[in-house]
Every structure is written in structure tokens, then in C-alpha cells.
Image: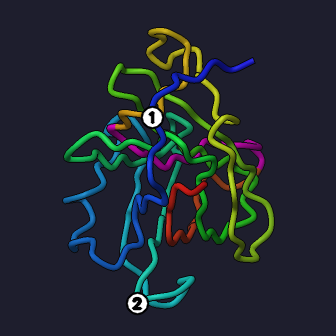
Amino acid sequence: MLAIVKKSEDKGPHTIDDFESVPDPLTDVYQSNAGGGPLTLKLDPDNKKDGKYDLRYDYDTGTPKYAGATKRFSEPASWYGNEYLVCWFKPDDSGNRLVLQFKEKSGEYWEIYKELTGTEAETVKLRLTDFVLPPWGGQVDLKLDLTEIVEFSIYVNQGDPSKSATGTLFFDDFEIVK
């Protein structure tokens, strides 16, 4: 059973990004992992949930077999008292694996995975307590602490090696909700 650090209730929801007020180029907000494969992030007006833009995420998992980018928050965010990460998402049927990740101020990382099957856009609702601490994830106290979140990342890991290591995903409206 996952232990959760208990604090006073927070007032959600929290918007991680809706891609409406993100400056272009996106590299000013989302830093690509230098050890990963090539990644291009663009504001896209054509595949959005609502508003003017979504995030177009062109990736190549390449030799390291992953590609990803991280948004660092200027101040730690408290997601405590909320239950879900919700976002609009259009997969590419690549057979690769989407990894959504956040990092606590303590240095612990938490991840959740979604196989990239189909091409129909959908709103996904992911329970925060379903995120797992990966073995490399800066294990500090092994307790999910939603009170001081400092980073949010979007990665793609290579899946079936017989399928393409490249693809394009679309995202909109990343939110933390009750």
C-alpha cells in the first residue's frame, strides 16, 4: 500500500499547462532531456481540445530508447487533496509507451505509464496514487508527498522494437483535480 504524506487540504484544481499562455519557443518552458532521443515541441492549432493551441510532441526514442521534456515550476506546487491528473491526449498507435512523471522537492520521482495504441483523441483521468516510484527515482522516504511538486515531465519510451521509434502525440489541458 502506498503511503501518502498527510497535510492540510489544498484547493484544486491546478492547471499544469493548457498551452494557451506558453511562450514560443516552448524550449523556454519545457527542457528536453539531453540524454534522450530527439524531441520537438510546438504549439499546434489543429489538434486541440479547446482554446487556440495544444502541444505537438514529435519524438524519436533513438538509441537511448526514450525521449522527454520537463517543465520546472518556479515555486513548488501543492497538489494535496486532489485525486487525479487529467489531460486531453491524442496517441499515435506506435506501440511505444507514454510516461507522465512528476518530481517532489525531496527528489523522489513518480511515474505512470500508458501504451500508445489507437489514434483517437481522448481525455484521460489518472489517479495520483497509481503513480509509482521507479527504482532509479531518488528514493527518499518512499511516501507520495503531493505538497511540494517541483517538476512535471512527458516522456515516450520505446516499446515493441519491431515498430517505429518515432511518432507524434498531441496534448492539451494538463490539470490536477479532485
- Left of 8 or right of it: where is 83? right
Which amino acid, by three-letter code, is at mark 1? Ser
Which amino acid, by three-letter code, is at mark 2? Lys
Find residue 100 and report its horizontal and vertical position in percent. Answer: 56, 45
Local crowd size for mark 1, using a 10 Å CA cut-off: few (<14), some (14–19), many (≥20): few
**Is residue 160 or residue 142 the one in the foreground?**
142
Query: Residue drawn at (52%, 22%), measured in percent from left and top?
Result: 5
- Identify the residue under disc 2: 52
Q: Is residue 158 magenta?
A: yes
Numbered disc 2: secondary structure: loop
* Front disc: 2 or 1: 1
Q: Is residue 68 magenta?
A: no
Local crowd size for mark 2, using a 10 Å CA cut-off: few (<14), some (14–19), many (≥20): some
Vertical position of residue 160 compared to residue 19: above or below: above
- Identify the residue under disc 1: 8
**Is residue 77 or residue 124 the one in the foreground?**
77
Vertical position of residue 177 compared to residue 139: above or below: below
**Is residue 43 or residue 80 the one in the foreground?**
80
Find residue 112 and report its horizontal and vertical position in percent. Answer: 64, 39
Q: Give the magenta-colored segment's residue range.
A: 150-162
| Colouring rule applied to residues | rainbow
Q: Which of pointers 2 and 1 lies earlier in the amino acid sequence?
A: 1
Determine whether label 2 and label 1 are within 8 Å by CB: no
Vertical position of residue 114 compared to residue 168: above or below: above
- Left of 43 or right of it: where is 88? right
Query: Residue drawn at (72%, 72%), measured in percent from left and top?
Result: 122
